[in-house]
Amino acid sequence: MCQKSTGAPAAVLAWVVRQSLLWTGEAKPLEYRSSPIAVRSFCGKCGSAIALAYDAGDEIGIHTAALDQRAELAPAPQYHYGAESQLPHNGGKLVGRQ
């Protein structure tokens, strides 16, 4: 689902506790239920993917490419969801793994 949602072979998400996130600006992201277990957020103006939130968790994954100050992040790979649907042309390597 990430590949279809982002239009890319992989998505890089920064996971934060939902209660620690504060949306600022003119409008909050719009949401849609992308599966029985998760909701995705997107920009209502340009359509950019913004976030992923699983119903059963207390974290929300923010698409790092959607952040204005993304260069300030120093993410450490922790999760590899959807590895079964990785594309064959990436050499079989998951992002963040050797």
Image (cartoon, grey):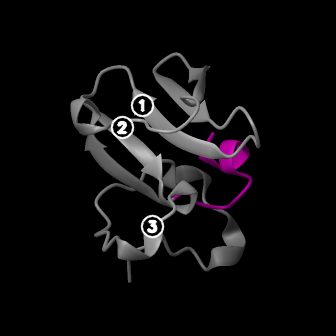
Left or right of residue 11: residue 13: left
For label 3, the residue is 69
Nearer to us: label 3 or label 1? 3
Q: Residue pushed farthest top? A: 36
In magenta segment, residue 3: yes
Q: Amino acid at mark 2?
A: Ile
For label 1, the residue is 53
Task: List x then y, in percent, for residue 87.
Answer: 67, 64
Work out whether mark 3 precedes mark 2 in sequence or the reverse, and give the earlier one.
2
| Residue pictured at 31% horizontal, 38% vertical | 21
User: For the C terminus, which image quadrant?
Assistant: bottom left
For label 1, the crowd category at 10 Å Cα-Cα, with few meaning under 14, some 14 to 19 and many 20 or more, is: some
Nearer to us: label 3 or label 2? 3
Q: Amino acid at mark 1?
A: Ala
Left or right of residue 46: residue 17: left
For label 2, the residue is 60
Region rendered in magenta: 1-11
Q: Note whether 19 is above or below 4 in the view shown.
A: above
| Residue pictured at 27% horizontal, 27% vertical | 57
Q: Secondary structure at mark 2?
A: strand
